[in-house]
Amino acid sequence: MTNGGPDLPQFDDGKAPDALRTIGEVAKALKIRQHVLRYWEEQFPALKPVKRSGGRRYYRPEDIALIATIDRLVHREGYTLRGARKALQGKSANLEQQVEPAPQPVPAASAQPSQLSMFGDELQGVLAELKSIRADLAAALSAA
């Protein structure tokens, strides 16, 4: 069982605390969907799980701690992905008090191409989250 702080998940799988964990084990322990973890790998350069044959991911304890920190920043403290990335890179002077607000949407009809491109990363993140929500809603509706 891993017990390294409030952000770290508890694993009751009989493995050593420093054992490698699959994406499914990490997703279940942190209650984060697997596709979100894969997306975060693209967004956070420091998050690099070990990949073995067939592209199967294995997360080290330091990867799991980083995921737990990202989850806390994004889902509990209100950081955007960009803000969380900056905070993790040390660009934010005070993590507890400084929260980067989400960018205001630019109406598509009045937006210039240069205005849209400066929000490219943010828009991709929002789009991925909206697709995830849509998939969850579709699954819930089909189950009902």
Image: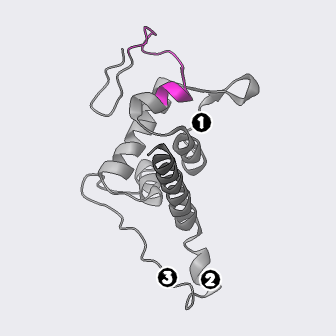
Task: Please state, as top left, top right, bottom left or bottom right, where the N terminus lies in the image.
Answer: top left
Instruction: Give the amino acid type for the residue marked by disc 1 in the picture.
Output: Lys
Q: Residues within 10 Å of mark 2 (few under 14, many from 20)?
A: few
Mark 1 crowdedness (10 Å alpha carbons): few <14, some 14-19, many ≥20: some
Name the one closer to the observer, 108 or 68: 108
The residue that label 3 is drawn on is: 106
Q: Which mark is residue 93?
A: none
Can you tell which mark lies on residue 48? 1
Q: Up-down: is 86 above or below 3? A: below
Say whether residue 52 is magenta.
Answer: no
Secondary structure of residue under mark 1: loop
Distance, label 2 to label 3, CA atoms, is 12 Å
Which amino acid does the dot numbered 3 rest on?
Val
Examine the rendered structure and indicate whether residue 110 appears above or below residue 138.
below
Kind of residue at badge 2 = Ser
Image quadrant where residue 118 sits: bottom right
Q: Give the labeled residue for mark 2.
A: 114
Magenta span of residues: 12-26
Q: Secondary structure at mark 3?
A: loop
Q: State the image coordinates of residue 11 (x, y, percent, origin top left).
A: 39, 19
- Residue mark closest to the camera, 3 vs 1: 3
